[in-house]
Amino acid sequence: MTEETITKADEGKRVVNADGTEVGRLVDVRDDHGYVEPDPSITGTIKAKLGWATRSDEAHPLDEGSIEEITDDAVYLRGTLCQ
């Protein structure tokens, strides 16, 4: 398994469960933790990609231990992030 480091540059990427289900977008990265917004609006997605997003109370915390791989367009999880 690889260790992936999440950064501010990853904000706006899709977050995908190990089973291939897209569960949301990475909207905020702080102190080595990401926050996944389930079903963000198109405006929220654009803001996240520009680094302007704010997370809502519905955002799920995501730590680096949950990440299998980070690609140019998505963050792939080792397991499942329930919505």
Image: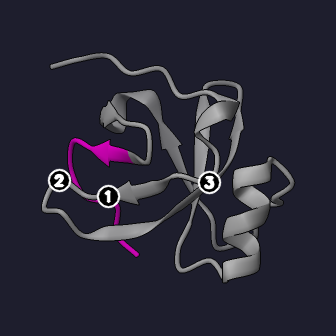
Q: Mark 2 to mark 1: distance in Å?
A: 7 Å
Name the residue: 50% across, 44% down. 62
User: What mark, if any, has residue 74 been given in the picture?
Assistant: none
Q: Main secondary structure of the magenta part?
A: loop
Q: Where does the image place residue 23, in percent across and percent down from the top left? A: 39, 69
Name the residue: 29% across, 45% down. 77
Q: Amino acid at mark 3?
A: Gly
- Residue 81 falls within the magenta-colored stretch: yes
Element class at badge 1: strand
Asked if residue 52 lies left or right of residue 37, the reply is: right
Mark 3 — residue? 12
Q: Residue 42: name its quadrant.
A: bottom right
Mark 1 — residue? 16
Which of disc 3 and disc 2 is earlier in sequence? Answer: 3
Q: Where does the image place residue 22, in percent across and percent down from the top left? A: 33, 68
Q: Would you place residue 45 above or below residue 48 in this image?
A: below
Q: Where does the image place residue 47, in percent across and percent down from the top left? A: 79, 62
Which residue is more in the foreground, 59 or 22?
A: 22
Q: Mark 1 to mark 3: distance in Å?
A: 13 Å
Is residue 12 visible to us here?
yes
Name the residue: 24% across, 69% down. 21
User: What are the residue bounds of the magenta stretch?
Assistant: 75-83
Q: Amino acid at mark 1?
A: Val
Q: What colour scheme governs how the chains and residues are painted in the rendered image of this protein? A: one colour
Q: Would you place residue 73 above or below residue 20 in this image?
A: above
User: What mark, if any, has residue 18 been given in the picture?
Assistant: 2
Q: Mark 2 to mark 3: distance in Å?
A: 19 Å
Q: Check the picture and name the quadrant holding the C terminus.
A: bottom left
